Amino acid sequence: QKEVEQNSGPLSVPEGAIASLNCTYSDRVSQSFFWYRQYSGKSPELIMSIYSNGDKEDGRFTAQLNKASQYVSLLIRDSQPSDSATYLCAGSPRGSGNTGKLIFGQGTTLQVKP
Amino acid sequence: EAGVTQSPTHLIKTRGQQATLRCSPISGHTSVYWYQQALGLGLQFLLWYDEGEERNRGNFPPRFSGRQFPNYSSELNVNALELEDSALYLCASSFRQGWSYEQYFGPGTRLTVT
């Protein structure tokens, strides 16, 4: 199993709908998780960080962490065409030798159709 | 507040040459991270510098090296360039806050090796 896995998509949703992006992680990943948005040809932009079980909301974005099932999700409410991008899930690997490192999933491409 | 800056934006080198990439972190951030984003391979962790010291490195050969200066800026050196080194090189910075490393990325340097 890869350390951080995402479905590459594309995930297509109509404008105004809720987009749900999912990420699973292995036992080799610790409890710090991050969601980044990357537009084509641009660098990743940090959207959310989540460290505890449960939900964390910021505007239209909600991150959910379920440690028992080892998954992290990102919900985007009222999706806009400008949300069309690749969403990267990242986690911190366990072990003192892995400090500072983030492991990224391959990313899920989201398409929001007007 | 200015974000992470990187230079140059694009760099074209021939195989066997050396490349030097530069990064300035967000003001107040002491940690600098380097990642490689090659086509089809996703974001791969390269190096982490904090307080002028190399703290961790990813699974890359020794010809990838760097340093961090007293003002916390950093440079990445890639020696004996190979064609497969062609990629987007991303620099990120963070406060060093224990295990919660929220990393903020710069715009990247696109390295092309011919």
Image (spheres, rainbow, N blue to C red):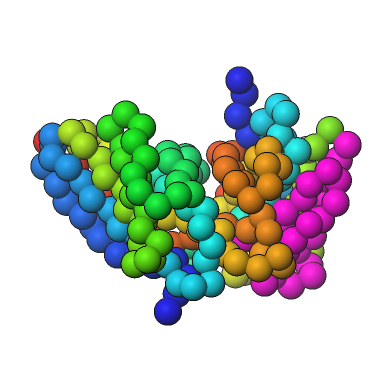
- Residue name at image x 72 percent, y 29 percent: B28
Please identify the residue farthest to the bottom as the structure is shown: A1
Residue B47 percent coordinates (x, y): 71, 58
Residue found at x 88% / y 37%: B70
Work out whether residue A6 or residue A49 is closer to the camera in this orientation and state it.
A49
Observer-nearest of A98 and B110: A98
Q: What count of labels does the image hold? A: 0
Q: Quadrant of the C terminus of chain B?
A: bottom right
> In front: B77, or A15?
A15
The residue most toward the right is B70
Looking at the image, can residue A31 be seen? yes
Asked which quadrant contains residue B104, the reply is: top right
User: Is A104 positioned to the left or the right of B17 in the image?
Assistant: left
| Dominant secondary-structure state across the stretch colored magenta | strand
Would you place residue B69 above or below residue B56 in this image? above
Taking A38 as reference, is A77 left or right? left
Quadrant where the N terminus of chain B sits is top right
Left or right, residue A96 beside residue B2: right
Residue B48 within the segment the image draws in magenta: yes
Identify whether B103 is placed above or below B36: above
Residue at 40% over, 62% down: A67
Please say whether residue B25 is one of the residues in the magenta stretch: no
Q: Position of residue A17 (x, y in %)?
A: 13, 40
Q: Quadrant of residue B113?
A: bottom right
Magenta residues span B43-70
